[in-house]
Image: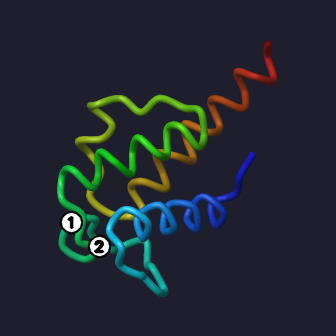
């Protein structure tokens, strides 16, 4: 399973690829829209890439709660833990 720093690095890479803007020293308190410059289309694109990369499904109600980079990391961390436990139990 990935650790939080690896997840954060992947997230930053996906955001940079999608927006074409380089982000250095991303703080978890950064707002996805105002600080990172993501609009709704960018966010959908990044989420889609995250789902494919980690082979997880993010629910619409979860996505509506995402405001900061930390929110995304918390959600991904939780989803990846559940996915790992499910694979382990199978």
Give the image location of residue 73, x and y in percent: 49, 56
Residue found at the far bottom of this picture: 24
**Residue name at image x 51 percent, y 67 percent:** 13
Vertical order, 34 against 39 (above or below): below
Vertical order, 63 against 46 (above or below): above
Give the image location of residue 57, x and y in percent: 47, 29
Count how many numbered circles sit on residues in the image: 2
User: How would you rate the neighbour count of disc 2 (Cα within 10 Å): few for under 14, some for 14-19, many for 20 or more?
Assistant: some
**Residue name at image x 48 percent, y 68 percent:** 12
Q: Which mark is residue 36?
A: 2
Q: Quadrant of the N terminus?
A: top right
**Residue name at image x 42 percent, y 82 percent:** 23
Real-space Cα distance between discs 2 and 1? 6 Å
Vertical order, 71 against 36 (above or below): above
Camera-side residue of 47 and 19: 19
Camera-side residue of 11 and 78: 11
Give the image location of residue 21, x and y in percent: 35, 78
Q: Quadrant of the C terminus?
A: top right
Q: Which mark is residue 78?
A: none
How has the structure been colored for display?
rainbow
User: How would you rate the neighbour count of disc 1 (Cα within 10 Å): few for under 14, some for 14-19, many for 20 or more?
Assistant: some
For the residues labelled 2 and 1, say whether their Cβ atoms are less than 8 Å apart: yes
Where does label 1 land, which residue? 33
Vertical order, 88 against 29 (above or below): above
Please tell me in which quadrant of the rendered image residue 54 appears.
Answer: top right
Please tell me in which quadrant of the rendered image residue 17 appears.
Answer: bottom left
**Residue name at image x 49 percent, y 86 percent:** 25
Is residue 55 left or right of 1 when viewed as pictured? left
* Secondary structure of residue under mark 2: loop
Give the image location of residue 78, x and y in percent: 55, 41
* Secondary structure of residue under mark 1: loop
């Amino acid at each position: 399973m990935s650790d939080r720093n690896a997840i954060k690095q992947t997230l930053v890479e996906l955001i940079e690829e999608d927006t074409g803007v380089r982000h250095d020293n991303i703080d978890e308190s950064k707002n996805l829209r105002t600080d990172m410059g993501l609009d709704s289309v960018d966010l959908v694109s990044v989420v889609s890439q995250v789902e494919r990369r980690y082979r997880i499904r993010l629910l619409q109600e979860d996505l509506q709660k995402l405001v900061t980079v930390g929110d995304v990391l918390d959600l991904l961390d939780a989803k990846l833990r559940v996915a790992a436990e499910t694979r382990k139990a199978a």
